[in-house]
Image (cartoon, helix red, strand yellow):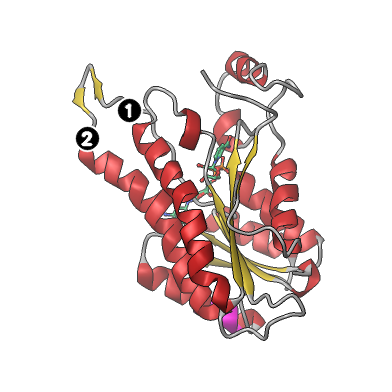
């Protein structure tokens, strides 16, 4: 799909990887709707990007909230043709630790936001996308999810997070099969270690240590590099049903 004809919803678009994607789609001439819980940062970014961007306070796990957000996008821009799922949370809790077993509520919360939230956006956005006039490649829309290398090499304390990201990787192919007849592609990025506000809050020594983990280049990923892959997944009509690691070759021990 051509970026300058795209109307993209970017969840988690107020921060980090989502913000980079929103900026990149905007720079390529696309219209952007930032869906996030962080009203202050989301509103500021939409204002900075101008009248081809809106912010909607959306909880990705909530059906009514997403429906209202999508209504706002259609009211502003007429249609939705891309959904980039970047909203997510990470926790570090062991299955059994000094404080006892992993609280089930914490596990469920991660699954609810990361996995069910991504699916909620995909199912409701695809309902809107199916109304679009197909382009010359037969496309009505594209959905891009954010998994993580934790889907494959989860660390201690990442049972919930890794399960949520593994679920995102696993649902990519069946969703692309479900949505192909509507002209909607589905792809997933599995990022390695990226320098986002979450990572920047770690001590510098820890950041330097993590930056040594990739094979090459030996540094953390730049959010703009992630946005570059998301742009490719929007633009290239032949990539579908795929999970792509973007990680400098890192395999976490
Ligand atoms: N940063 C990394 O190294 C890295 C690596 C692998 C995967 N990821 C994944 O990429 C995505 C973005 O990560 P990031 O580092 O940019 O994080 P971030 O914390 O900078 O941004 C996440 C955004 O999601 C929003 N959000 C959280 N819950 C929400 C909800 N229920 N509804 C709507 N918005 C919600 C937050 O307000 C925040 O603005 C996440 O899914 C994360 O798991 C990040």
**Secondary-structure class at tag 2:** loop
Spatial separation of the CA atoms under disc 1 and disc 2: 9 Å
Q: Position of residue 146 (x, y in %)?
A: 55, 48
Magenta span: helix, strand or loop, mainly?
A: helix
Q: Nearer the viewer, residue 17 or 173?
A: 173
**Secondary-structure class at tag 1:** loop
* 156 vs 170: above or below: above
Extent of the magenta region: 71-75
Q: Position of residue 253 (x, y in %)?
A: 51, 18
Q: Nearer the viewer, residue 89 or 133?
A: 133
Give the left or right position of residue 184, taking residue 69 as reference. Answer: right
Q: Residue at the spot x=54%, y=34% of the render?
A: 149
Q: Say whether marks 1 and 2 touch (CB < 8 Å).
A: yes
Residue matched to label 1: 93
Q: Residue at the spot x=75%, y=49% of the render?
A: 228
* 64 vs 36: above or below: below
């Amino acid at each position: 799909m051509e970026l300058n004809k795209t109307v993209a919803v970017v969840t988690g678009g107020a921060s980090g990887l989502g913000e980079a994607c929103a900026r990149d789609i905007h720079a390529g001439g696309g219209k952007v709707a930032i869906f996030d819980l962080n009203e202050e940062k989301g509103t500021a970014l939409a204002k900075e990007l101008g009248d081809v961007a809106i912010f909607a306070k959306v909880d990705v796990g909530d059906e009514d909230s997403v429906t209202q957000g999508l209504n706002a996008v259609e009211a502003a821009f007429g249609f939705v043709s891309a959904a980039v799922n970047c909203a997510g949370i990470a926790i570090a809790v062991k299955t059994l630790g000094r404080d006892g077993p992993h609280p089930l509520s914490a596990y469920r919360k991660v699954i609810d936001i990361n996995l069910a939230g991504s699916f909620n956006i995909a199912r409701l956005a695809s309902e809107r996308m199916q109304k679009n006039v197909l382009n010359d490649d037969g496309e009505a829309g594209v959905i891009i999810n954010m998994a993580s290398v934790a889907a494959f090499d989860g660390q201690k304390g990442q049972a919930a997070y890794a399960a949520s990201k593994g679920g995102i990787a696993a649902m990519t192919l069946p969703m692309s099969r479900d949505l192909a007849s509507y002209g909607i592609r589905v792809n997933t990025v599995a990022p390695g270690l990226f320098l986002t506000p979450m990572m920047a809050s770690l001590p510098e020594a820890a950041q330097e240590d993590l930056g040594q983990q990739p094979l090459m280049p030996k540094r953390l990923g730049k959010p703009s590099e992630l946005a570059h892959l998301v742009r490719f997944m929007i633009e290239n009509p032949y990539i579908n049903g795929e999970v792509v690691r973007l990680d400098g070759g890192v395999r976490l021990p």
